[in-house]
Image (tube, grey):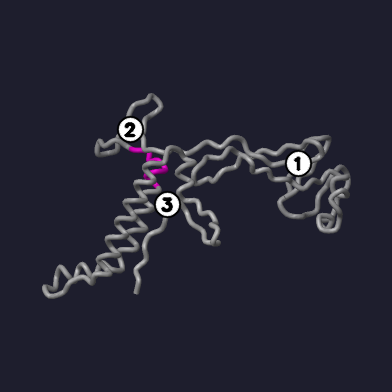
Amino acid sequence: MYAIVEDNNITQYINNPKSVVIGDVRYPAKIFELWSQSEKEAIGIYEIIVDKSNYKDPAYYNNANSTYTFADGQVTESWGTATPKRLNDENAVDEDGNNILDDDGNQVINYGLKTEKKRIIKQQASGLLAPTDWYVVKASEVADYSVPSNITTFRADVRAKSNEMETSINGASDVDALQALFTYTQQADNTTTRPLGEFPRLEN
């Protein structure tokens, strides 16, 4: 991405190479490919440098809108300070601070990141258990049938791991701590792991 700078002010942004008019001269799109950086800058075309030092994962933070500045012969796109998203649930209120109720008179809840992440964990656990549900159904309907021990163990392990993960999520003290639970890092043996751990898999 490029910016056109005239009289020290950014006057245009260019996402893709195209013919441009600077002053009274029209330049063909080919200059973006054929001209050197210094040649383009000599007529006011600068490649935009992206500074993401303040940009954070939008799954956990609300990022400020990016801004473009021209200084010291360089056009930079940067972001302001990111704001962490809500960590815990809270009651929804109107502009006067009064609780907002739904059509049935129940309090409307603004759910936080912890609840969102726990929902994901529950969905993942449910997805792992679903393929073996038929064993349990059959055992409830057929008197002389019992669920194989490896299936019973697997299902119990999935539920235990799900509970363990939710406990870890509940214990996160802030957004960064919550994000860290889900962040994979490379280990000395070249494997990648995350503090939250993984669900067990059914062994054939």
Element type at mark 2 = loop
Question: What residue is drawn where x is 27% and y is 39%?
Answer: 103
Q: Earlier in the sequence, mark 2 or mark 1?
A: 1
- Magenta residues? 109-116
Q: Nearer the viewer, mark 3 or mark 2?
A: 3
Could you tell which of marks 1 and 3 lies nearer the N-terminus?
1
Q: Which mark is residue 196?
A: 3
Picture coordinates of residue 155, whole percent (x, y) = 28, 63
Q: Inspect the magenta stretch and tell me whether residue 172 lies in it.
A: no
Q: Quadrant of the C terminus?
A: bottom left
The answer to whether residue 203 is left or right of residue 30 is left
Q: Residues within 10 Å of mark 2 (few under 14, many from 20)?
A: some
What amino acid is at disc 1? Answer: Val
Whether the residues at callouts 3 and 2 have beta carbons within 8 Å, the answer is no
Q: Position of residue 10 (x, y in %)?
A: 76, 39
Residue holding disc 1: 75
In the picture, residue 150 is in which quadrant? bottom left
**Circle 2 is placed at which residue position?**
100
Q: Who is closer to the viewer here, 187 or 115?
A: 187
Instruction: Give the quadrant of residue 70.
Output: top right
Q: CA distance from mark 2 to mark 1?
A: 46 Å
